[in-house]
Image (tube, rainbow, N blue to C red):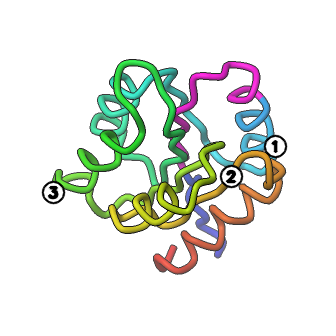
């Protein structure tokens, strides 16, 4: 794996403090990370940049994460991009809804350290044959 391509991660997170923690961790691990602060901007950025993977919060201004996920999955250009829902909504219904809508995984922020989120991303992208 000498020609290792830099994996691009797009984070849609309205909490700037938290976004910076994830950004720092992913950059330290050699990922390229971009960030949007609301669902609408997130969807536009994802369509433009076509990242390798998306970390998506659910409770977002302008457009919630479920709507963003739905839009990503119905667009032929973005439907194959894996999406990890990274949220504090831990209700069983929300988890099931997210996974049924096509999310690759559902992580509850309070239960995962940034380093564990990085590991999850690596896991999912390995499955994709990266």
Nearer to us: label 3 or label 2:
2
Q: In the figure, residue 126 lies in which quadrant?
A: bottom right
In percent of width and height, residue 48 lies at: 29, 34
Left or right, 40 with respect to 110, comes to left
- In the displayed structure, 56 sits above or below 105; it is above
Left or right, 33 with respect to 103, comes to right
- Give the residue number, with chain letter if any, for mark 2: 108
Residue at position x 80%, y 42% from top? 25
Disc 1 from disc 2: Cα separation: 22 Å
The numbered disc on residue 39 is none
Residue at position x 56%, y 59% from top? 5
Task: Determine whether label 3 and label 2 are within 8 Å by CB.
Answer: no
| Number of numbered discs | 3
Residue at position x 54%, y 65% from top? 105
**Label 3: how many residues lie within 10 Å, few (<14), some (14-19) or many (20+)?**
few
Is residue 70 covered in magenta? no
- In the displayed structure, 33 sits above or below 35; it is below
Q: In the figure, residue 88 lies in which quadrant?
A: top right
- Along the line of sight, which residue is nearer the eye, 38 or 30? 38
Task: Determine whether label 1 and label 3 are within 8 Å by CB.
Answer: no
Q: Quadrant of the N terminus?
A: bottom right
Residue at position x 48%, y 48% from top? 54
The numbered disc on residue 28 is 1
Left or right, 66 with respect to 88, comes to left
**Label 2: how many residues lie within 10 Å, few (<14), some (14-19) or many (20+)?**
some
In percent of width and height, residue 12 lies at: 51, 34
- Give the residue number, with chain letter if any, for mark 3: 76
Numbered range of the magenta stretch: 8-20
Q: Going from the N terminus, do you reach mark 1 or mark 3 first?
A: 1
- Along the line of sight, which residue is nearer the eye, 5 or 130? 130
In percent of width and height, residue 112 lies at: 79, 54
Q: Going from the N terminus, do you reach mark 3 or mark 2 first?
A: 3
């Amino acid at each position: 794996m000498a020609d290792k391509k830099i994996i691009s991660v797009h984070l849609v997170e309205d909490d700037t403090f938290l976004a910076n923690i994830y950004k720092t961790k992913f950059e330290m691990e050699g990922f390229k990370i971009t960030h949007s602060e609301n669902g609408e901007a997130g969807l536009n950025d994802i369509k433009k940049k076509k990242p390798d993977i998306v970390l998506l919060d659910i409770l977002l201004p302008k457009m919630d994460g479920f709507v963003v996920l739905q839009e990503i999955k119905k667009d032929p250009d973005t439907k194959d991009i894996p999406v990890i829902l990274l949220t504090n909504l831990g209700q069983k219904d929300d988890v099931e809804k997210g996974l049924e809508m096509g999310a690759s995984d559902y992580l509850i922020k309070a239960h995962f350290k940034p380093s564990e989120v990085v590991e999850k991303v690596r896991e999912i992208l390995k499955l994709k044959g990266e």
